[in-house]
Image: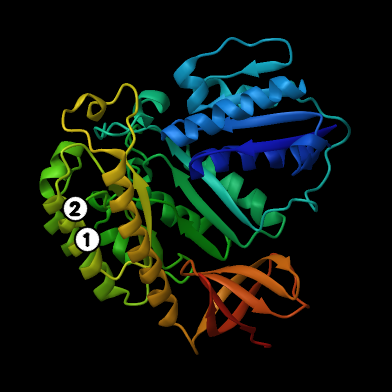
Amino acid sequence: MKVCFITYGCKVNQAESQKWDKILRKRGYEVVNEPENADCWIVNTCAVTHKAEIQSRQIINKAKKLRKNAFITGCYVELIRPKSEENINFFVNNEKDNIINYFSYMHKEKDLISFSRHRAIIKIQDGCNQYCSYCIVPYLRGSPKSYEIREILREIQDYESIGIKEIILSGINIGLYGIDFRNHINLNTLLRSILKETKIPRVRLTSIEINYINEEFLEMLSHERICKHLHIPLQHGSDKILKLMNRPYSSKEFIEKIEKILSSYPEISIGTDVIVGFPKETEEDFNKTLKLIEDIDFSYIHVFTYSKRPLTLASQFPDQISEEIKKQRTNILLEIAKSKKLNYIKKFINKELEVIVETQKNSYFTGTSNNYIKCLIKTDNLIKGSLIKFIVEDIDGEHALGRAIKE
């Protein structure tokens, strides 16, 4: 049987789908990338933005139209709570792992030589209790829930056994890891265990909130196996807007922490998220965001245009910003984001990076560096999934262009 995974939204959804992918391959199923060629779809939906909600609704309608056998879960399903029908089975978030129970072993367990990923995403926690005023996720994912360290280590060791060179630790709010345990375990505890109990060459973190970055964490970041890359959401540069968003820091506190990180690790990649057009955002507020971003050496910026989400406090705020103004401000920030990314890559021209080889496109291979630069490698003779040394020679679009260094 051929199965296709269709995944929208966050790294947590990607981690879940990747785990199911691995399990089904072991059970003898063929995982394909083209939905039309699959006998069954497993769809992980999203509802964090209005656009994601539309995409999720459209894929459900497509499954119905094509009469595909489909198992559909994720935050959009949690939001609208549809009833299963004929060939479509819906699972709310706390039931989503039950999907895999519908797929029995087709034959004796097989190896994962066909596993297509070269960087594995591992879910370490779910849920959040921050309740930022714009965010629907806590209502759909629930309170924080952490996975046991031994369970995470087993999953890492499983990926390690098939030659995966990098694992990416993901969660809705990874800084909350361990908060639901009684034995004072936290993210730093988990990182120490991974470094001690596994040999995976690279450990990368997904988004982490600024208030969970402490001295111990910064010290651990010096370990050679932990990628020099942090994604730290800013959301806004105005303290007035940050307060309305229910963010637990001021712009000054954010700047001071970023400056401390950069002083310790000058070449580290720091990415961020920014929301444009939040209710009550004046031109002055927006300019504060622009100034903060211009003053900090971010390596990339994800720009989100604010959209009302049901259940959230901000959806009820007065002084909603017009779509025209939101579009204008978004475009300004996107241009700055493009410039920031190019300036960061330029720092590494004629320098050496460690890169995981991922895909091949014509005469180039693509890969991701330790510090999260996407690379184009000029060669036709590399092994996918391998770790190589790479010299940056130029920039092509938003990629570093260069060649592999023969050892």
Image quadrant holding the N terminus, namely top right
Real-space Cα separation, disc 2 to disc 1, in angstroms: 6 Å
Residue occupied by mark 2 = 286
Residue at 56 percent across and 42 percent down: it is: 15
Number of the label disc, if any, that sits on residue 240: none
Number of the label disc, if any, that sits on residue 290: 1
Q: Can residue 220 be seen in this view?
A: no
Residue at 65 percent across and 37 percent down: it is: 6
Q: Can residue 183 be seen in this view?
A: yes
Q: In the rendered image of this protein, does residue 73 appear above or below residue 341?
A: above
Q: Check disc 2 and give the amino acid type.
A: Phe
Whole-percent x and y of residue 377? Answer: 65, 77
Q: 183 and 314: which one is in front?
A: 314
Residue at 48 percent across and 50 percent down: it is: 169
Residue at 34 percent across and 23 percent down: it is: 310
User: How many other residues sit within 10 Å of disc 1, few (<14), some (14-19) or many (≥20)?
Assistant: some
Q: In the rendered image of this protein, does residue 66 appear above or below residue 244?
A: above
User: How many other residues sit within 10 Å of disc 2, few (<14), some (14-19) or many (≥20)?
Assistant: many
Mark count: 2
Q: 255 and 149: which one is in front?
A: 255
Whole-percent x and y of residue 55? Answer: 55, 33
Q: What element carries label 1?
A: helix
Q: Check disc 1 and give the amino acid type.
A: Leu
Image quadrant holding the C terminus, namely bottom right
Q: 357 and 65: which one is in front?
A: 65
Whole-percent x and y of residue 220? Answer: 36, 64
- Horizontal arrangement in the rendering, residue 380 relative to residue 250 (left or right): right
Q: What element carries label 2?
A: helix
**Tag 2 and tag 1, C-beta contact below 8 Å:** yes
